[in-house]
Image (cartoon, rainbow, N blue to C red):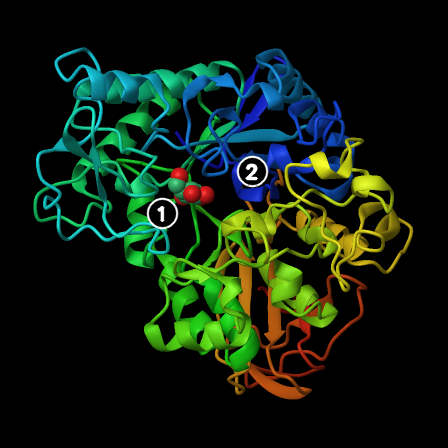
């Protein structure tokens, strides 16, 4: 089966590669809109904002877990995978969200943390009280806490071991995250079957994709690191087989916070596919590094490594999400530099990362916000926005852990920022009232009213991206430039066999991280004589010289997206 060719069913064209052109938006149900005044967001509230999201240009929503949970890890501690937490709504309300999203041609991707459950899950309760019973072997139990010594601790701020003693079963249980999140035992076929059933349950309800939370950590082995073990890849391959066979067009997204050569393994191969998408953890911190170091070198290195992946595979690129800006994928030297630039107050740090939102990270610089969004929307892969970043929302570093950047969405300058009608004291988290990001001026309504607001700018850039298939479907080739602050690449789309027809398209993307204006020579050998024009305003730019060089000047922290049109006589 070709992954770019649409399948046509009676009355319906199913584009299997929809995710490659999609713009995704991560929205935490609890943080978005409270429709019943109880102080927490809910599914009906989210459904009421689908028109806004459609206007913005969003094609797919990623919903972090909204299942039954004690909410000790933002819902990633699930106590029942097939029940919706009552404060978020009901299954009927979820069905309504899916239906109304689909009516707008918008997809729903849900997040499934299957590596672990909450300790409040019935399976764990039975496992600890009845070791010989049906759930006795559902978790990873041991008489010692010395097994798997090479498996690192992830939540270093709160855990000093991956093992915790259970006083009831009188054994240790294994956990990669919080000690209230025991890891499921994937060596037990019943656990594998149970997780497949859960995934089928949600796919049967019509969801378009599953984010596989913490996917590298499913299996452990003696002497292994517990990250991307062969058995874990085998599990994902089997899952993919099931999805392709029974739910064609639905996608799997890997959350694998790993080095590039390890992340690509979660795509598998064309012959033995795994996930359709994987988040691009290595590129993300390097974008922030480039901004402050004024050097594109590290970004160039990591982008050049991204060339080998199967044809169906696509990166999920992002700037921020509901977690800390993780610095696990950079060297110690770079990490220390990033802490110095972006987390000068120790409160801004958590685990191996920085718990701040996009606008505060960039000190609310409009030039930097535009630059990083332009990069996000032109890198190879599909962009994932984090709710609120489209209006430059602030954070609250006085709140614990990652709650700093999970505060309620700011819709209006009214009570509770239009998020909820509850007594302000009842909100699950307070609204941001800081000097710079106060909801009285940082809100959707105010930005809708200003034609030059960040919100309108982001919407515009999304729509320009969507009008050019090269961004979603094209290859990416990094070009040599004469200035270390300047990143340049060509997105090249050959154009055949897709809903866009047969029109080839090449877009030159140029970004300057310099803190002053620069002039730069870009090596466009092979494009001699090409006549670039600006994708936004259509203005013509100087042609590429006969020696294959294009000389451009860029204002401080500026960028260009230029269509590389052929001259009449040049066949590009
Ligand atoms: C999620 C985190 C969560 C962790 C443990 C992660 O990968 O993104 O928010 O705390 O899994 O469930």
Q: Position of residue 212 (x, y in %)?
A: 39, 35
Q: Residue 155, can we see it? A: yes
Which residue is most to the front? Answer: 167
Name which residue lies at 72% across and 33% down: 33
192 vs 397, left or right, is: left
513 vs 72, left or right, is: right
In the image, ligand 1 is in what quadrant? top left
Q: Quadrant of residue 178?
A: top left
Which residue is most to the right? Answer: 449
Q: Is residue 370 above or below residue 229?
A: below
Q: Which disc number belongs to residue 428?
A: none
Q: Is residue 377 above or below residue 10?
A: below
Give the residue at mark 2: 498
102 vs 177, left or right, is: right
Give the residue at mark 1: 256
- Please tell me which residue lies in front, 179 or 55: 179
Q: Is residue 570 above or below residue 152?
A: below
Q: Is mark 1 within 8 Å of ligand 1?
A: no
Name which residue lies at 76% across and 45% down: 410
User: Helix, strand or loop at disc 1?
Assistant: loop
Q: Position of residue 97 (x, y in %)?
A: 65, 21
Name which residue lies at 25% across and 30% down: 235
User: Helix, strand or loop at disc 2?
Assistant: loop
Q: Quadrant of residue 26?
A: top right
Q: Position of residue 342 (x, y in %)?
A: 54, 71
Mark 1 and mark 2: Cα distance apart in space: 29 Å
């Amino acid at each position: 089966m070709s992954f770019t060719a649409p399948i046509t069913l009676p009355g319906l064209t199913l584009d299997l590669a929809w995710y490659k052109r999609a713009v995704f938006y991560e929205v935490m149900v609890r943080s978005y809109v409270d429709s019943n005044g109880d102080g927490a967001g809910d599914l009906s509230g989210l459904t009421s904002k689908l028109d806004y999201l459609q206007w913005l240009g969003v094609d797919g929503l990623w919903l972090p877990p909204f299942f039954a949970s004690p909410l000790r890890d933002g819902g990633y501690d699930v106590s029942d995978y097939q029940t919706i937490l009552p404060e978020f709504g009901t299954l009927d309300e979820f069905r309504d969200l899916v239906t109304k999203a689909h009516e707008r041609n918008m997809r729903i991707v849900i997040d499934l943390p299957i590596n672990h459950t909450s300790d409040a899950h019935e399976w764990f309760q039975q496992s600890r009280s009845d070791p010989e019973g049906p759930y006795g072997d559902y978790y990873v139990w041991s008489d010692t806490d010395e097994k798997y010594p090479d498996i690192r601790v992830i939540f270093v701020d709160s855990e000093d071991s991956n093992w915790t003693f259970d006083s009831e079963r009188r054994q240790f249980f294994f956990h990669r995250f919080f000690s209230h999140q025991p890891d499921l035992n994937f060596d037990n076929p019943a656990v594998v079957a149970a997780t497949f059933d859960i995934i089928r349950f949600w796919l049967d309800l019509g969801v378009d994709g599953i984010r596989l939370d913490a996917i590298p950590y499913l299996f452990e082995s003696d002497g292994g690191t517990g990250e991307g073990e062969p058995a874990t890849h085998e599990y994902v391959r089997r899952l993919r087989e099931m999805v392709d066979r029974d739910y064609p067009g639905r996608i799997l997204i890997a959350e694998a916070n790993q080095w590039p050569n390890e992340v690509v393994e979660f795509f598998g191969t064309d012959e033995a596919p795994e996930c359709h998408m994987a988040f691009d953890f290595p590129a993300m911190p390097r974008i922030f590094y480039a901004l402050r170091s004024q050097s594109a070198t590290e970004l160039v290195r990591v982008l050049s490594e991204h060339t080998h992946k199967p044809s169906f595979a696509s990166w999920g690129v992002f700037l921020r999400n509901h977690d800390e800006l993780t610095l696990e994928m950079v060297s110690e030297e770079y990490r220390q530099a990033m802490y110095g630039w972006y987390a000068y107050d120790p409160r801004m740090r958590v685990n191996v990362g920085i718990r701040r939102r996009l606008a505060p990270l960039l000190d609310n610089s409009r030039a930097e916000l535009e630059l990083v969004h332009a990069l996000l929307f032109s890198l190879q892969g599909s962009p994932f926005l984090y709710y609120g970043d489209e209006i430059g929302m602030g954070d609250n570093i006085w709140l614990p852990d990652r709650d700093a950047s999970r505060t309620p969405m700011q819709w209006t300058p009214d009570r509770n920022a239009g998020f909820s009608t509850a007594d302000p004291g009842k909100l699950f988290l307070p609204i941001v009232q800081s000097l710079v990001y106060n909801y009285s001026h940082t809100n959707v309504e105010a930005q809708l009213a200003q034609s030059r607001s960040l919100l309108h700018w982001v919407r515009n850039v999304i729509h320009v991206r969507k009008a050019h298939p090269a961004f979603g479907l094209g290859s990416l080739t990094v070009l040599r430039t004469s200035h270390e602050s300047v990143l340049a690449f060509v997105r090249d789309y050959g154009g055949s066999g897709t809903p866009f027809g047969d029109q080839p398209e090449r877009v030159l993307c140029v970004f300057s991280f310099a803190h002053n204006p620069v002039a730069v020579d870009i090596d466009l050998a092979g494009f001699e004589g090409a006549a670039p024009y600006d994708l936004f305003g259509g203005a013509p730019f100087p042609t590429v010289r006969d020696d294959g060089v294009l000389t451009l000047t860029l204002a401080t922290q500026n960028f260009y997206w230029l269509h590389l049109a052929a001259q009449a006589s040049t066949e590009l």
